[in-house]
Amino acid sequence: MSVFTYKKSLMSAVLGLVISGNKLAAAEIPFWHSMKGELGKEVDSLAQRFN
């Protein structure tokens, strides 16, 4: 195996681990809106179910 192929394989493995590590982290995303009444309640409900 050449040095270039080895480095490419190593970088691919490292990149895969970095990307998969970010997928495991949970984050709550605040959702802002200015709807009131029944539509506002429905939007709040959708946002809560999403999070």
Image (cartoon, helix red, strand yellow):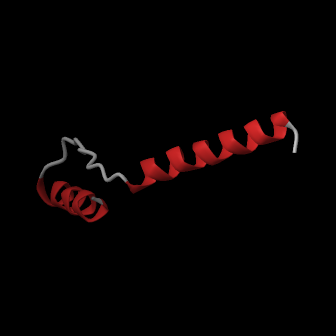
Count of numbered marks? 0
Q: Residue at x 21, y 63 (%)?
A: 45
| Foreground pick, 9 / 29 | 9
Q: Is residue 13 left or right of residue 4?
A: left
Q: Residue at x 23, y 44 (%)?
A: 30
| Foreground pick, 35 / 17 | 17
Image coordinates of residue 11 in percent, x first then y, are: 67, 39
Quadrant (top left/top right/bottom left/bottom right) for the C terminus: bottom left
| Foreground pick, 19 / 38 | 19
Q: Is residue 39 left or right of residue 4?
A: left
Image coordinates of residue 44 in percent, x first then y, are: 19, 57
Q: Residue at x 15, y 59 (%)?
A: 41
Is 43 located above or below residue 5 in the figure? Answer: below
Q: Is residue 23 left or right of residue 12?
A: left
Extreme residue in the left direction: 37
Q: Residue at x 74, y 45 (%)?
A: 9
Image coordinates of residue 17 in percent, x first then y, are: 54, 49
Quadrant (top left/top right/bottom left/bottom right) for the N terminus: top right
| Foreground pick, 41 / 23 | 23
